[in-house]
Image (cartoon, rainbow, N blue to C red):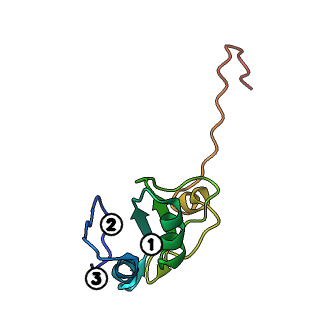
Amino acid sequence: MYKEVFGPVLAVMPFADEAEVIDLINDTEYGLAAYIWTSTLQRAHRLADRVEVGKVSINSPSGGRLGVPHGGQKRTGFGRKNDFAETMREFNQAKGLLIDLTDDDISL
């Protein structure tokens, strides 16, 4: 996979060993995230340590979590942020809203 695709895409590929998996994942100029399914905790740690991406989810299709660094490596994303909430704030415009729901007439 040599193009950065944003959307519900699942790439399922057979592999001979962990070294091949690492090569397949890292053989791209992009590195936003990797989602890895395994029943072995040791394998999860080994793969997470060696893949060149900004975020690794193990046995979960989960997106960001509060307090977890968010961003990509290589030529992807917009840099590294401290957490998912900080990233989302950059894509939104904050606005304060105060509403008095009492029946008191405070007209001036």
The answer to whether 48 is drawn above or below residue 38 in the figure is: below
Where does residue 9 sit, x and y in percent of width and height?
27, 62
Quadrant of the rendered image containing residue 106: top right
Name the residue tied to disc 1: 32
How far apart are labels 2 and 1 at the CA level?
A: 10 Å
| Identity, as a three-letter code, of the amino acid under mark 3 | Tyr
Quadrant of the rendered image containing residue 61: bottom left
Position of 84 with respect to 108 (left or right) is left
Where does residue 64 sit, x and y in percent of width and height?
51, 56
| Identity, as a three-letter code, of the amino acid under mark 1 | Leu
Q: Single out the residue that lies furthest toward the top.
A: 103
Residue 54 in view (yes/no): no
Name the residue tied to disc 3: 2
| Identity, as a three-letter code, of the amino acid under mark 2 | Phe
Quadrant in the picture for the N terminus: bottom left
Name the residue tied to disc 2: 6
The answer to whether 104 is drawn above or below residue 1 in the figure is: above
Residue closest to the eye, 105 or 68? 68
Residue closest to the eye, 8 or 22? 22
Q: Is there CB contact under 8 Å for labels 2 and 1?
A: no
Where does residue 36 sit, x and y in percent of width and height?
41, 63
Q: Crowding at label 3, few (<14), some or many (≥20) Cα neighbours within 10 Å?
A: few
User: Nearer the N terminus, badge 1 or badge 3?
Assistant: 3
The answer to whether 108 is drawn above or below residue 98 in the figure is: above
At 39% from the left and 59% from the top, the residue drawn is 37
Q: Crowding at label 2, few (<14), some or many (≥20) Cα neighbours within 10 Å?
A: few
Q: Secondary structure at mark 1?
A: loop
Q: Secondary structure at mark 2?
A: loop
How far apart are labels 3 and 2 at the CA level?
A: 13 Å
